Image (cartoon, grey):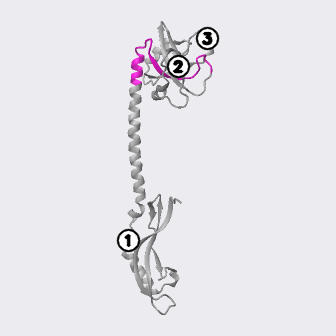
């Protein structure tokens, strides 16, 4: 059985004494210990040292109760307690290990987040650089809000769109048939495996998007994505923005 928490006696001092107990006429040999109660958690020391306590054992290992101590023995115990200090650092150093582990974890987590943040910034910069030069044949990663017919869609699946052509104020696009539905947040890495490889991987329907609104969004500062609004002849079936461009291949 694995014990993750335990209380034990930390021995500060131990010596053999020959003394007479209260109400006894002859001296006997005992083992005297000065201990302090301490705790361990997962094998690491996590506290103790609040009091010093005596433990007296006879030759058979039986604990002698303090009420049986003689005055002479009490005086010796008092002297022995004064001679030994409690090693608080040794008893509480588990907290030092935990604190160090937290600092290391925080450092690794901070570096990881910084790298991830820098990667997202680079991806966003690449995205908007490509969007400034939108042209037929380009592929983009998106989060969908409706299906290709403007109907409801479960969750916020990710997938691909292909720029089919641009005519006047209209962008013509096709959606990928396969979507990523298992991840809550959009990441380009999550949709890399479902990137269409042939024309059969794209929806047959070509959807029309508002190019003017698209261009206006490119002028807005600190954008992380660009929303596209459907403007096809059946636009009454659609509700607002139908997907957001979030990544570029």
Q: Are marks 1 and 3 in contact (CB under 8 Å)?
A: no
- Left or right: where 16 falls relative to 62: left
Residue situated in front as seen by the camera: 163 or 59: 59
Quickly name the residue at label 2: 176
Q: Position of residue 146 (x, y in %)?
A: 58, 21
- Which of labels 2 and 1 is toward the front? 2
**Residue 120, located in which quarter of the rendered image?**
top left
**Sequence-wise first label, 2 or 3:** 2
**Which residue is rendered at x = 39% and y = 19% of the image?**
129
- Which of labels 2 and 3 is toward the front? 2
Tell me the CA gap for discs 2 and 1: 74 Å
Q: Position of residue 76 (x, y in %)?
A: 41, 82
Tell me the CA gap for discs 1 and 3: 86 Å
- Left or right: where 99 falls relative to 1: left
- Vertical comparison of 22 with 33: above or below: below
- Vertical comparison of 44 with 223: above or below: below
Task: Give the residues in magenta.
Answer: 124-151
Quickly name the residue at label 3: 234
Residue situated furthest left in the rendering:
83
Number of other residues with Cα within 10 Å of mark 1, as a class: few under 14, some 14 to 19, many 20 or more: few
Q: Are marks 2 and 1 in contact (CB under 8 Å)?
A: no
Quickly name the residue at label 1: 85
């Amino acid at each position: 059985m694995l014990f993750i928490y335990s209380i034990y006696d930390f021995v500060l001092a131990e010596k053999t004494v020959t003394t007479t107990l209260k109400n006894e006429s002859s001296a006997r040999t005992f083992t005297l210990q000065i201990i302090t109660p301490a705790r361990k958690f997962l094998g690491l020391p996590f506290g103790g040292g609040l009091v010093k306590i005596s433990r007296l054992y006879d030759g058979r290992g039986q604990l002698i109760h303090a009420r049986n101590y003689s005055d002479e023995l009490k005086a010796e115990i008092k002297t022995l307690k004064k001679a030994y200090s409690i090693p608080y650092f040794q008893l509480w150093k588990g907290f030092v290990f935990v604190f160090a582990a937290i600092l290391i974890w925080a450092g690794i987590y901070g570096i990881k987040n910084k790298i991830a943040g820098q990667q997202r910034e680079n991806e966003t910069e690449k995205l908007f650089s490509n969007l400034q030069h939108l042209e037929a044949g380009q592929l983009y990663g998106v989060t969908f809000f409706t299906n290709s017919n403007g109907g409801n869609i479960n969750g916020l699946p990710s997938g691909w769109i292909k720029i089919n052509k641009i005519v006047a104020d209209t962008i013509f696009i096709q959606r990928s048939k396969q979507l990523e539905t298992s991840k809550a947040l959009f990441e380009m890495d999550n949709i890399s495996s479902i990137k269409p490889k042939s024309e059969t991987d794209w929806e047959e329907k070509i959807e029309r998007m508002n190019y003017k609104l698209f261009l206006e969004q490119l002028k807005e500062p600190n954008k992380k994505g660009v929303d596209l609004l459907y403007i096809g002849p059946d636009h009454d079936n659609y509700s607002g923005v139908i997907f957001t461009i979030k990544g570029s291949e």
